[in-house]
Image (cartoon, rainbow, N blue to C red):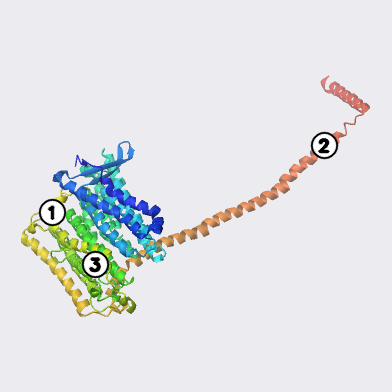
Amino acid sequence: MDHPVQTDFLRWIVLFPLLGAAVNGLLGARIQQRAGKRVVAVIACAPVTLSFLFSLWAFSRLLALPAKERFLIDHFYSWIPMGSFNVDVAFWVDPLSAIMILVVSGIGGLIHFYSIGYMHEDRSLWRYFAYLNLFTFSMLLLVTGDNLLLMFVGWEGVGLCSWALIGFWFTDHTNTRAGNKAFIVNRVGDFGFVLGIFLLYWTLADQGHGTLLFREIQGHVGLLANVELWGVGVATLITILLFIGATGKSAQIPLYVWLPDAMQGPTPVSALIHAATMVTAGVYMIARLNGLFSAAPLTLEIIAVVGAATAFFAATVAVTQTDIKRVLAYSTISQLGYMFLAMGVAAYAAGIFHLLTHAFFKACLFLGSGSIIHAMQGEQDMRRMGGLRRVMPATFRTFTIAVLAIAGTPFLAGFFSKDAILWQAWASHNVALWGVGVFVAGLTAFYMFRQFFMVFFGECRADPHVQEHLHESPKIMTWPLWILAAGSVVVGYIGLPAFMGGSQIDHWLDPVIHAHHEHHSVAEELGVMSVSIIAAAAGVAAAWFLYYVRTPSQDASPEARGFSYRLLYNKYYVDEIYQFVFVGGTLMLARVGAAFDRYIIDTIVDGSAKTTIIISWFNGLFDKYVIDMLVNAVANVTFAVGNNFRRVQTGNINSYLYVVVGAVVAALIIKLRYWS
């Protein structure tokens, strides 16, 4: 790591999507009008494809290097040179970021191609692809930036793009509300994230090693060991603040509420946000700073508890939802909880492994749901579906593989990654967290097969008009599903348990994430694995019995199904609580502020104005009847005296002589009388 290999091609992995966004964003409307939507799609898909090819090139370059030297860097330009503080725009690819760029550009590229078919009727296709390219650029910047500031630029970029994409159909007020909700909730988390960055740099600078470069932070973590702030270890404070940012981006309790509403955007956007990009940012950030988080055991405990609670909470909500995309949204929140559970028990490689497998099967599920919605003419309520396996064979088969994968079916991708997390939780002696993870595995299998049976089996419950036009999606939408379904099968084999040969992804990430492998018996590992398999099988069996054998009435309202069902169906009323406490509280404070302004401030201002008017009126009277009278009186006296003295000047010489003689006589008399 001290001497990474210098390159000059990593920048293009990031800049190609930015170029596509610029062309479509600035010229897309004119291009679409003159050359058609196909050209707009090519301008959008080609850059992401090139990014993927360059990512493969970077991956092959890493493979050719010795394991301990797999680090590539591309210095683009000096960004902030300020004394001892220097931050460059530099792109860093190591085993961890190599996985991320392949996921973002590869799965993101498939979503771009899928969008050609899904969005072909939209008049603003150029704007959609401009946002999608910009989103991809921001995520690639986030995972390749070699310092925290550059990561933060990408971090904010995906937040901005998610707002634009969730509210893409902005003429519908529901969509704009969802976009605003995502933006505002993420800003809450981002405030904690940026405070964590500031505190980290300030503390390291105080120790004489101020830096925000990831490779240098890892080397200077020991300097934080004995530093405290407000009686708490500064490493703990920093990591808690950074984790607050992660709870926003990766939708963990308490900042998860934006993600279910993000379903208002186009379905390919949901797949991009939920599978390959934005929601994985928090997991990646913790893995990237694993040395810093490992130095804060209390923070790791908090992360593990929050992850387990989020996984449980979201899974229980998913079992009652009827919107096909909302089930998948709560599934994403739950699976992210699994990843944070892994991070909390310091199983960073297992968390990244689940991030990778989840990207495949969750993207397949979302794009599969988009194919279903496309065939159902926009219908998303699973109670209006059923029997679709007969008319949508490709979607059915790929969806089946993805459902099996996420449910933890043995020898599929989701099974291996979930087992890795549950095993690490067990091996770290967190039995309670392991128990929650096993229970959530059963719930996951239940709600996913519930969805599977409601959508594809039984009789179709859609309107007759919709049933007449049911059809399989075009090939531009189905071939990405097959690729993702294949990944949902084979990707898991890079993370086999120890008794099956060991995890290749652990060895791949070892230069970045130094895992501590404890040796346990094969019997113990098989026993732990068997429990999770039994839990998943129980979930599948329950879903099969309740939604295939019994086929419950789809017309029963939630209100008729008891308090527990209503509680879960209404998401524990968290949105209503947040609306009342935070939104309502903010509005109440605004109303109180408005009332204070109206009745206090305005009264004071208006009273001051009226007082000023009254004082001015008295001043006017005083000026008119006192000052003016005195001035006029002085003037009149002066005039009268002057008028009388004026008569002395008669112009008669005899009069002047009389006056002179009189004055002389008076002077003589006075002199003789008083001075002799």
How many neighbours does mark 3 have within 10 angstroms: few (below 14), some (14-19), or many (20 or more)? many
Mark 3 against mark 1, which lies toward the viewer? 1
Of the numbered discs 1 and 2, the one sitting upstream in the chain is 1
- The quarter holding residue 474 reads bottom left
Residue 219 drawn above or below residue 556: above
| Amino acid, disc 2 | Val
- Separation of residues labelled 2 and 3 (CA atoms): 106 Å
Q: Label 1, on which residue?
A: 504
- Can residue 293 be seen here? The reply is no
Q: Residue 531: give x, y in percent of width and height.
A: 12, 66
Residue 323 drawn above or below residue 153: below
Is mark 2 in CB contact (under 8 Å) with mark 3? no
| Amino acid, disc 3 | Ala
Judge from the rendering whether residue 581 lies leftward or rightward of residue 320; answer left or right.
right
Give the number of marks: 3
Q: Residue 397: give x, y in percent of width and height.
A: 20, 69
How many neighbours does mark 2 have within 10 angstroms: few (below 14), some (14-19), or many (20 or more)? few
| Amino acid, disc 1 | Gln
Which part of the image, by quadrant, shows the C terminus? top right
Is label 2 in a helix, a strand or a loop? helix
How many neighbours does mark 1 have within 10 angstroms: few (below 14), some (14-19), or many (20 or more)? some
Q: Residue 502: give x, y in percent of width and height.
A: 10, 55
Of the numbered discs 3 and 1, the one sitting upstream in the chain is 3
Q: Residue 374: give x, y in percent of width and height.
A: 31, 69
Mark 1 against mark 2, which lies toward the viewer? 1
Q: Label 2, on which residue?
A: 641
Q: Nearer the viewer, residue 556 or 201?
A: 556
Is label 3 in a helix, a strand or a loop? helix
Q: Label 3, on which residue?
A: 315
Of the numbered discs 2 and 3, the one sitting upstream in the chain is 3
- The quarter holding residue 432 reads bottom left
